[in-house]
Amino acid sequence: MPAALLDGKTLARQIRSELAVEVADFIENNVTVPTLTAVLVGTDPASEVYVRNKRRDCDEVGIQSRLHQLPEKTTQDELLALIGKLNKDDSVHGILVQLPVPKQIDTELVLDAINPLKDVDAFHSENVGRLMQGRPRYLPCTPHGVLELLARNEIPTVGQHAVIIGRSDIVGKPLSVMLAQRGKDATVTLCHSRTKDLPSVARQADILIVAIGKPNFVTADMVKPGATVIDVGINRTDKGLVGDVDFDAVREVAGYLSPVPGGVGPLTRVMLLVNTLAAARRLEQ
Ligand code: NDP
């Protein structure tokens, strides 16, 4: 029997409708509207699409969104000055600097300049540190989306062997910490490009999560029969968007499989809204 699909699109729609109720309730009980401010430096077409989608999501749930679009040549000091202004602006609850920023700007410096209470991407070093210590303020959006996809499909993590392929700071590394924490209680193996005999490690997974950015990298022989496979990858190819998993072949082996598009991506977007509402609650309390 082919794997059951983990439908992130429908789940994201459901979470957005839940959030719309919570946002309306917040607005009724506070004098402000939860507000997300996005900062986009330059004209990277993919970044422009991401920001546009994030703003559309905000509209749908009643979160106010603002955009500061700065020219490609913006200096680091100019960007830091804007962030300083947004940090002080009480009407702004969440600040998002769309990555990547142009070369003349130090990404880490910029992320660390954001008020950690307004850091809805959860990339500030203080928020990363808190996550490591098991007392997160905000959860990073993509790993949170993966956990929500598992939880809402009632896929247990306790005692399960989760193998994550990819150790980036935004996906694999934080996800490994989140899955290993008390409550999730998975046994986690974090793999990367230097992992020896990756196929045999992957085959041990009850839950296999792939975030590397290589189309069709995970083949059927890398998957234990019945395993849950979460494909985080987004690759633009001649055939459109594809993930890191050979979808058709792996579907014949896995128990559950998240599609691309329509799997983790929509949940990543929704988690930004969750964090923005959480930031508004925190800042207005
Ligand atoms: P990065 O490029 O930052 O990291 C890639 C990771 O994959 C690295 O740890 C690298 O290992 C590892 N890797 C690369 N090749 C191999 C290999 N042959 N075998 C094993 N490991 C390998 O990626 P991101 O985490 O930023 O993104 C990964 C993918 O997820 C991309 O396709 C991206 O578009 C997508 N993505 C999707 C999101 C969503 O919402 N669905 C959100 C964010 C990203 P090493 O460290 O050794 O170099």
Image: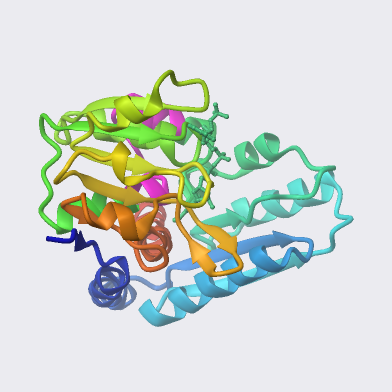
Residue ranking furthest to the right: 73
Asked if the magenta segment contains residue 248, the reply would be no
Q: Position of residue 179 (x, y in %)?
A: 25, 34
* Vertical comparison of 78 with 57: above or below: above
Q: Quick one: 214 or 102, which is closer to the camera? A: 214
Answer above or below: position of 221 versus 199: below
**Left or right of 169, for residue 197:** left
- Whole-percent x, y for residue 97 in the image: 63, 54
Residue at 58% over, 74% down: 52
Q: On the rendered image, what quadrant is the N terminus found in?
A: bottom left
For the C terminus, the quadrant is bottom left
Report the residue at 61% width, 71% height from top: 49
- Farthest residue, direction top: 196
- Compared to residue 262, the image places residue 127 above or below, namely above
Q: Quadrant of residue 48?
A: bottom right
Residue drawn at (41%, 51%) of the image? 232
Quadrant of residue 50 in the image? Answer: bottom right
* Colour treatment of the image: rainbow
Foreground residue among 218 and 121: 218
Residue 276 in the figure: left or right of residue 83? left
- From the viewer's perspective, tell me whether residue 46 is left or right of residue 140: right
Residue 246, position as x, y percentages in the image: 39, 53
Q: Is residue 142 magenta?
A: yes
Picture mark count: 0
Give the residues in magenta: 128-144
Q: Position of residue 112 (x, y in %)?
A: 61, 36
Examine the image and state in which quarter residue 266 appears.
Answer: bottom left
The structure residue drawn at horizontal position 30% and vertical position 39%, both measured from the top left corner, is: 221
